[in-house]
């Protein structure tokens, strides 16, 4: 009995999900915009002047702004708009490189560089500290004893001269 109820619940859930996905395109035109133009402008580059879209005043930047605004009003997501612009202009239209393929290197190199730098600084600090402690912990007894012996000899000569 429980198995039948479970199967019926799964079937109802599957039909509900299918109905919701079929209704999604019709509802997309009535959906409020998901982002503002200022949200996406800093993430896009002008193909003409190679500066960020929010800093560019070229005709190409104006055309991209109109395209973004049109698609935004149609209910497109920010990612859909970016994908369409990449299809038209190539990946150079994105201000940040994609976090996949060769673009992943651009995201990883700074982090790895910082970690290596921190490790080098810590290693150098540990080495300097060990050297300082080693110098204080073990003074060279051979030289000190030799110097002490010469001082004692000089003092004896002085005492002998005074007599």
Image (tube, grey):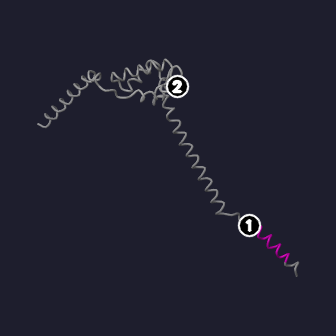
Q: Quadrant of the C terminus?
A: bottom right
Left or right of 159? Residue 67 is left
Give the dominant element type of the magenta stretch: helix, strand or loop.
Answer: helix
Is disc 1 surrounded by few (<14), some (14 to 19) or many (20+) residues within 10 Å?
A: few
Q: CA distance from mark 1 to mark 2?
A: 69 Å
Is 155 a magenta residue? yes
Q: Secondary structure at mark 1?
A: helix
Chain part drawn in magenta: 142-158
Q: Which residue is mark 1?
A: 144
Which of the pair 46/156 is nearer the observer? Answer: 46
Image coords of residue 52 (percent x, y): 50, 26
Q: Which residue is mark 2?
A: 51
Left or right of 49? Residue 75 is left
Q: Residue at x 49, y 17 (%)?
A: 59
Q: Residue at x 74, y 66 (%)?
A: 144
Instruction: Note whether 109 is above or below 33 in the view shown.
Output: below
Is disc 2 surrounded by few (<14), some (14 to 19) or many (20+) residues within 10 Å?
A: some
Depth check, mark 1 against mark 2: the one in front is: 2
Left or right of 21? Residue 35 is right
């Amino acid at each position: 009995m429980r198995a039948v109820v479970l199967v019926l619940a799964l079937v109802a859930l599957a039909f509900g999900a299918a109905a919701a996905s079929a209704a999604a395109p019709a509802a997309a035109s009535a959906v409020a915009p998901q982002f503002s133009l200022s949200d996406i402008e800093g993430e896009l580059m002008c193909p003409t002047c190679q500066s960020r879209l929010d800093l560019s005043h070229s005709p190409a930047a104006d055309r991209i702004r109109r395209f973004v605004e049109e698609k935004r009003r149609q209910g497109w997501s920010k990612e859909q708009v970016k994908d369409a612009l990449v299809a038209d202009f190539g990946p150079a239209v994105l201000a940040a490189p994609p976090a996949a393929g060769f673009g992943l290197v651009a995201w990883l190199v700074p982090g790895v560089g910082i970690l290596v730098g921190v490790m080098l600084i810590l290693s150098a600090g540990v080495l300097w500290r060990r050297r300082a402690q080693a110098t204080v912990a073990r003074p060279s007894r051979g030289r000190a004893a030799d110097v002490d012996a010469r001082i004692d000899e000089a003092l004896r000569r002085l005492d002998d001269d005074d007599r």
